[in-house]
Image: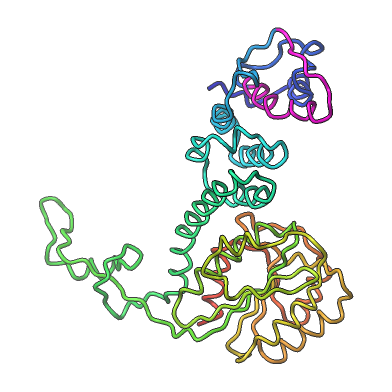
Amino acid sequence: MEIKLVRGPQERWRLLLGKYAERQFGDCLSKADGRRDAALDYLYTREYKKRGIKVEKVGGRRGSLDPTQLRALDWLAEVRALFPNNVFEALQSEAVERYQLADLLKDPQVWEDIEPDTSLLRTLLTYQDRADPAMQAELRRIAKNIIDDILDRLRTRVVRAMSGRRNRHQRSSMKASANFDARATVRANLNTWDNEKTRLIADQLVFMSRQKRHLDWTIVLCVDQSGSMTESLIFSALMAAILTGLPGIKVKMVLFDTSVIDVTDQLDDPLALLLSVQLGGGTNIGKALSYCETLIEQPSRTILALVSDFYEGAGPRPLFASVARLFEARVKMLGIAALDHSGQADFDRNIAEQLAGLGMNVAAMSPESFADWLAEVMK
């Protein structure tokens, strides 16, 4: 595929304005940019149709991606090949959520080809209530497959973080690469040195055991269910499901907007939990934390993780008072402004700074980093 790294102003404006600027700018696009232009046109021509504007064909087009000829599956493969992954995910979400591409939803080959990720899952959860009854079961099936895939990948990292530090002084029969002790293996095989081949022949491999940590902790996840926190909510539900399966850890989960809902009894089924969420609404963090206080039985063995952008809709005094009480009771507190792969967030920095001053550690992080932090606290 032709890749043109440097574009002049004329080419950039042509791509920005779309096919209707071709008369003014002429045939200035490279072959690869022509394909990108045609792929974007396939999706965004729908904006004209939504507004009742008649779409006319423009002569002299180089590509053959006319919407009447291209299937959704072909378009999906095309944008995946032409654009970086983050752009592809955005276009995929726009196609389903904004333009409701029926072909994209109804073609089973599309779902076999789509990469499972939280961006797509977020789109499916958003679209679920608007899909016709025949599609709802299919959307649930796809969402479950995505959840299972993410859980499988995330569980390995979480379990490893929680399983304890490696112990070099105790040997193990568990031959896992993460436990391989290279130095001890060399020492154990010094008598097998091959002078002719100048190499060590390792007949005996040595592996370290892992110290088992006694995990008698309660983790309270208090999660904002406003629309801007959707991806963090997804990862919170998945983390809760994984942590619930670990020995010695009790997990409680609370969702909130201006109301507070205890979903602790749903943690074994993340899909059902996420489908029950009503995204949006206001935010009353103080009310949610006040409820979480009633769930704490052993403060010094409790971790409270507040997942929120800290945009408090109510007055902040109840929130600050609750955090001060929790700190005085020696509850470990973490304020998570974002729980996603980006580790970046838009949040109320003023509120966050005041919460940090009251004893809450505040950060935006990935789920893997969150697992490492929990393991560090539980030492």
Q: Is residue 53 above or below residue 111?
A: above
- When asked about the image quadrant of residue 323, the answer is bottom right
Which sits in the foreground, 26 or 20? 20
Residue 373, given in percent of the width and then of the height, sits at 57, 72
Number of marks drawn: 0
Which sits in the foreground, 105 or 214? 105
Residue 262, given in percent of the width and then of the height, sits at 66, 76
Residue 152, given in percent of the width and then of the height, sits at 45, 59
Residue 182, given in percent of the width and then of the height, sits at 29, 65
Coloring scheme used: rainbow
Identify which residue is drawn at 65% across, 57% down.
231
Instruction: List the single residue furthest toward the top.
Output: 60
Q: Is residue 165 above or below residue 37?
A: below
Identify which residue is drawn at 53% across, 22% down.
1
Q: Is residue 119 above or below residue 29?
A: below
Instruction: List the single residue furthest toward the front.
Output: 133
Magenta segment includes 196? no
Magenta segment includes 58? yes
177 relative position to 360: left or right: left
Magenta residues (range): 33-59
Q: Main secondary structure of the magenta part?
A: helix
- When asked about the image quadrant of residue 160, the answer is bottom left
